[in-house]
Amino acid sequence: MSKARSPHAAVLAGILCAWLCLPPAAAAPQPPAPAQAQTRDAVAAYELGRFDEALQGFSSAARQGNRLAQFNYAMMLLRGEGTAARPQEALVWLRKAADNGMTHAQYTWGDLYERGELVPKSLEEANRWYERAAQGGHVQAQMELATNYFTGRGLPRDYAQAFAWYRRAASAGDGGAQYIVGSFYEHGEPGVVDRDIEQAKIWYARSAAHGDPGALAKLRSLLEETVRGRAGM
């Protein structure tokens, strides 16, 4: 997978996408309604570039236990938006958000440990955080964990675990994972998954629907093989 993005740029995307990264049935208790309203107002202020106002709103809601506010407050402290950068304080709030069940915060911890930024580099610790986020439904974390199992990066190589996590990400709609699952089915993997061309077609078709030209080419090739086989060619 690509590792070209700066973690700071990647985690800032959580200001908006974190709404979508929360597990649907989180165990953490819901914070009081005022904290939710403060967080919504702070997001709106951030989008308008009013960083001082956003920082204050996130800070207040974070102290009331709102995990999205905790994450966004951490990111603003990290980037120095509305304040001087305070990376160590940012890590405190990032950890609070992660422990509060915020999957994008958990994924961010994994990313930081994998890159060795602000924390000591540790692939084992990165994978531990990726797994927490992946279990909560975070698709990027599922992809990272699957790839690390597939390559044996910071984990024992395990194709069964890799396939299981790719399959979860694919079922959640990730086009890249759908292509990989299609490849598993096309070729088969002893002890993991039997060769199944019809399943391969299904997953390549789903990936192709996301605009993957490689998946479309694979699908066409398999369809042509099927036609030739039925024609006895």
Image (cartoon, rainbow, N blue to C red):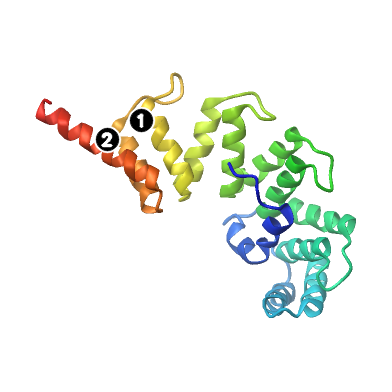
Q: Quadrant of the N terminus?
A: top right
Residue shown at 72% from the left, 44% from the top: 110
Element at label 2 = helix
Image x and y of residue 151, in percent: 59, 28
Local packing at callout 1 (Cα closer than 10 Å; few below 14, some 14-19, many 20+) is many
Residue shown at 61% from the left, 62% from the top: 17
Image x and y of residue 228, in percent: 16, 31
The mark tally for this picture is: 2
The residue carrying mark 2 is: 222
Between disc 1 and disc 2, the foreground one is: 2
Q: Amino acid at mark 1?
A: Glu
Q: Is 173 left, or right, of 100 in this rendering? A: left
Q: Is 193 left, or right, of 29 in this rendering? A: left
Residue 12 or 2: which is nearer the viewer?
A: 2
Residue 215 or 158: which is nearer the viewer?
A: 215
Kindly tell me whether residue 27 is visible in this rendering. no
Against 98, residue 55 (above or below) is below
Q: Amino acid at mark 2?
A: Leu
Image x and y of residue 23, in percent: 60, 54
Kindly tell me whether residue 98 is visible in this rendering. yes
Disc 1 vs disc 2: Cβ atoms closer than 8 Å? yes
Residue 232 or 16: which is nearer the viewer?
A: 232
The residue carrying mark 1 is: 186
Residue 84's disc is none
Q: Is 138 left, or right, of 186 in this rendering? A: right
Residue shown at 75% from the left, 56% from the top: 97
Q: Is 229 left, or right, of 152 in this rendering? A: left
Local packing at callout 2 (Cα closer than 10 Å; few below 14, some 14-19, many 20+) is some
Against 125, residue 28 (above or below) is below
Q: Quadrant of the C terminus?
A: top left
